[in-house]
Structure formats: structure tokens, C-alpha cells
Amino acid sequence: MLVTKTFHDVPSALDANGRPVRIFVISPVIPGYPNAKFPGVVVFSEIYQVTGPVERFAGQIASHGYVVACPSVYHEFQGPEAIPYDVEGTDRGNRFKIEKEVSAYDEDAKLSVDLLTSLPNCNGRIASTGMCLGGHLAFRAAFDRRVLSSVCFFATDIHSATLGKGKTDDTLIRVRRGDLTNNGELVLIFGKQDTHVPRAGRDLIRKELEDANVIASFIEVQAQHAFIRDEESKGRWDAALTRSLFTFLLEVFERTVGRDLGEKSSDVAEPEHVC
């Protein structure tokens, strides 16, 4: 499908300076069907805001029939422009990451879902995804019961609980508390050579999800951090692996938000295994 891009400046109640959140929206277009409605997906960016790789990733999702919202996560500190993939930009993005309140990250997610559900071309069925910082934010977006599935690429800081101001996020605390139990489906994708999330960290996240009976898939591949980023990935981009995992993402989204299955029953029989 063809896509169009626009943006909405949405007021933030938690920004002391009164600056809005700019949320970029990429929408599919079907000629001759001006009233078509599509599921929505929130795409959370890495520490560089909505860069070219993030926009292309979001555009690919939109072209498969989803209205995609990409919030500018550092609106408290700067405008919506992308942060460069250089040393100064990396230092700035990492600094902002731990200066922003966790509650402000959550507000951005809520405002993005609110925006999608208000758009005339969105049918109200919402998923989320993201990479690096955005993988963690997509994980936290799953606490919102309106989000029916989340696919999180190499999510940072979950295992160490170091997201946001004070570097003391409550993501795994909320998992233990049951805030994801009986919510939507969760998928976590990590590279085994990712130095940001070591094996012990991955094992901890998997254990917490399983202990809390969260509906989750855990995928580990032979890749480094940022392997899906098609620009300035420092030699880590794996296009073939990215394509395979993008297909997996589409399967999850098609199954969870691409179809309206009606109300979920609590009485679900276990499937029979036939050899």
C-alpha cells in the first residue's frame, strides 16, 4: 500500500514548559476507499528520536495496513528533530534517557494510543513496537490494556531497572505485580552478542515473564545490538535477519490486531496434540 505522513502536536500535562509531544503519523492509503479503517501501531524510537531508519521501519509497517504513530520522546529537552548518529548525539540521547521521568515516558505512550484511537482511519485495535530504548517503551506500553500486542527489539534497561530519572524504573516490579498477566501478547527479540543486554539480563527478563504467566515469546538470534537499523549501525545491520523478524512481527500484528475476534473468553481449552 501507499502511505502518507503527517504529524500532530499533542499537549503534555507533565511537561513543565508546556511543550507538546510531536507524534508523527504514517498512514496507509487505498485509492478509492477514503473511509477505510486500519489497526494502529505505536512505534517507539531509539535514543535518537525519529530518525531515517525508524521512519523507514514505521513506513514498512504502515504499508502493510496499519496506522503508525511515532512519538518524539525527548520533547521536554529539544524539538522533534532527529538526533545525529554521532558521539555527541549518542551522549545527548543517553543523557536525556535518564533525565526524563518514567511517568513522562508512560504519558507519551498513553497520548500516542489516545491519538490513534481518535483518528478516523484507525479502528481502535492497537499494537506497539520499538527498538533499543523504544523496545523498553513498547514493553511498558503493554501495561495499557488497549495495547493488544507488543514486539520489542533489543529492549534496553529492563533487566537493570535503569530507565528514566534516578535510573530506578519499575518495569519488572510491575510484571511481578501481575500488571501484564492476562494482558496482550508480548514478544522480546534480542541478539546474543548484544553487549547492552547480557545473557544474565535476558534470562532474568524471561524468568520474570514466565513466573508472572505473561503471554510472551522470547527470541534470541545471532546478532549484535541495533542489528535492524539500516543506517549508522557500526557494521551490525543484518538485512536478512531483519526481514525474517519483520515477517514474524507482521504475523503477530495480523493475528492480534489485524482481525477483530470479539471478546476473549476466559474458558479456553488446551489444544489437543496429535502425533
Image: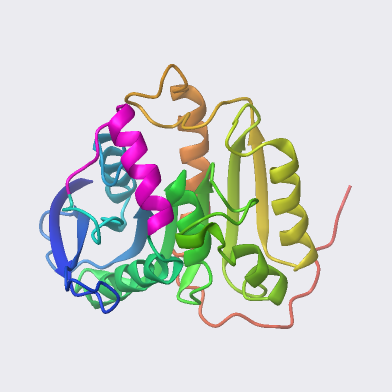
Main SS type for the magenta part?
helix
Residue 196 horizontal side relative to residue 81, left or right: right
Colour scheme employed for the rendering of this structure: rainbow
- Against 116, is 225 above or below? above
Q: Identify the residue at the far front of this view.
A: 166
Q: Which residue is depicted at the point 40% across and 43% down? A: 94
Q: Can residue 72 be seen in this view?
A: yes
Q: Which residue is depicted at the point 24% across and 77% down? A: 118
Q: Please tell me whether residue 268 belongs to the stretch shown in magenta.
A: no
- Against 84, is 114 above or below? below
| Horizontal and vertical percent position of residue 134 | 43, 50
| Horizontal and vertical percent position of residue 257 | 45, 65
- Between 271 and 88, which is closer to the camera in this rendering? 88
- Between 179 and 64, which is closer to the camera in this rendering? 179
| Horizontal and vertical percent position of residue 28 | 22, 53
Q: Which residue is depicted at the point 45% across and 61% down? A: 165
> Which stretch appears magenta?
81-99
Residue 16 placement: quadrant = bottom left
- Between 179 and 159, which is closer to the camera in this rendering? 159
| Horizontal and vertical percent position of residue 268 | 74, 76
Q: Identify the residue at the far top of this view.
A: 235
Q: Please tell me whether residue 94 belongs to the stretch shown in magenta.
A: yes
